[in-house]
Amino acid sequence: MLKIIATTNVKEGCMEQYLAGVKELVEQSQAEEGCVTYTLNRVKDAPNKLIMLEIWKDQAAFEFHTKTPHFTTILPKLREFTEPGEPALFLTEVEF
């Protein structure tokens, strides 16, 4: 499985617009066959900081996701409501 932690810093006063736009992205991503988890989370002590937690069945599922219309059209529109942030973390689970 491929796990991703993507951090977003929403501009002051833009949270409502950002959440309205990201709702469709979350819903459609969750419906993808290779999606295990796709949730948006607010950082408790930093209300303008959001974390997208994603788990994909495999790399191919994630690559499919990055080519979907909801990813390629919604994500660029959301950037107007965000500040530059940290790069996403791509994780693979350590197996024992």
Image (cartoon, rainbow, N blue to C red):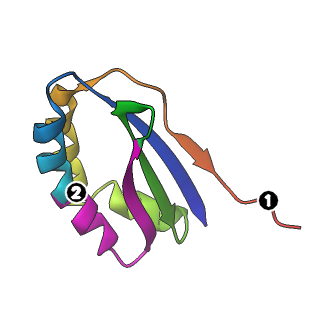
Q: Which residue is mark 2?
A: 25
Magenta residues (range): 24-42
Observer able to see residue 89: yes
Q: Quadrant of the N terminus?
A: bottom right
Q: N-terminal of the two: label 1 or label 2?
A: 2
- Of helix, strand and loop, which one carries label 1? loop
Q: Which residue is mark 1?
A: 94
Q: Residue 23: percent from the left, percent from the top?
A: 19, 56
Please name the residue shown 22% across and 43% down the image.
Answer: 75
- Of helix, strand and loop, which one carries label 2? helix
**Which residue reaches farthest bottom?**
33
The kind of residue tagged 2 is: Leu
Please name the residue shown 16% across and 59% down the image.
Answer: 24
Q: Quadrant of the C terminus?
A: bottom right
Q: Are marks 1 and 2 in contact (CB under 8 Å)?
A: no
Q: Nearer the viewer, residue 90 or 18?
A: 18
Image height of 57 relative to 69, above or below = below
Q: Is residue 82 magenta?
A: no
Q: Residue 16: percent from the left, percent from the top?
A: 12, 40
Please name the residue shown 52% across and 51% down the image.
Answer: 4
Image height of 82 relative to 94, above or below = above
